[in-house]
Amino acid sequence: MAELKLHILKPSVNNMAARVFVRAAKLKFVEDDAWGKTRSPEYLKKNPAHMTPMIEMKGLPNGVIWESCAIMQYLSNKHGLTRFYPKAAAKRAMIDSAMFYLIGTLYPLVARATYPVLGFAQYAGEVGSSNLDASHKAEAQAAAKAAIAEPLDVFHKFFMGGGKFIGGAKPSIADIRLAATLEFLNVVDYDLPAWAKTYMANMEKALGKAYAEPAADVRGYIAHVRSQAK
């Protein structure tokens, strides 16, 4: 029996990153669809933050951890998966910096631009969750969408150095997190720059079914959302 249990929500790109990783790393795992379960007493007892993705494993201080980047870092460390998370301090720092920059800068913009269309709840204090009228919400959404170009350029020029991946010749955990994030932009018809389109294609080619299968769930949800808007 697999020692790793991964609790996920299939439409989420945050969850997609962890789902891609465990497949690409060829880890033994079982996957639990947590749709409708995250507020249950059983789930909250394990995870009071009611978040996904979450892994459940023996040996963790509290039995579980959540947050996609933390999950990938932990599993890489546990299993010595240096092809995804280099051991050298300087290379690892670059991977960590890319992930933190994504979480702190790029992803909030992606969320503000896409969550209103995806039907996902926005965070407290966001314009989209306020009582402002639709025009103000649309303006905020458009501003977030326009602002995505700058951090994307940072990823290309700084973290990738114009190369193939953040991790160098092969994808790293930071690449998995970035590629998954960019999947959501399809719902707002975001015109990715040519390098990003090539990058996405290279990620899917490099990781094969490990990427394509979880991506299909995200893309399927986006297709459903778009069909309902017609």
Image (spheres, rainbow, N blue to C red):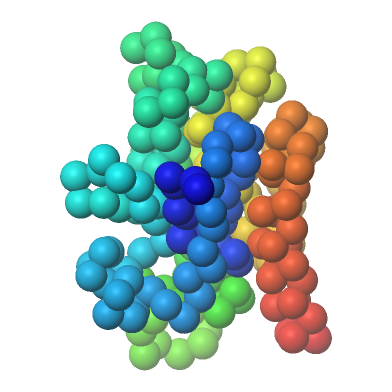
Front residue (pair 225, 31): 31
Residue shown at 40% from the left, 51% from the top: 55
Residue 128: percent from the left, percent from the top?
Answer: 43, 78
Front residue (pair 227, 157): 227
Q: Hey, which residue is sitting farthest left in the picture?
A: 61
Relative to residue 186, is residue 51 drawn left or right?
Answer: left
Residue 193: percent from the left, percent from the top?
Answer: 72, 40
Q: Is residue 67 above or below residue 132?
A: above
Residue 9: percent from the left, percent from the top?
Answer: 53, 66
Q: Hey, which residue is sitting farthest front in the picture?
A: 1
Front residue (pair 110, 55): 55
Front residue (pair 122, 206): 206
Q: Is residue 183 above or below residue 73?
A: below
Q: Quadrant of residue 48?
A: bottom left
Residue 28: percent from the left, percent from the top?
Answer: 55, 41
Q: Quadrant of residue 91?
A: top left
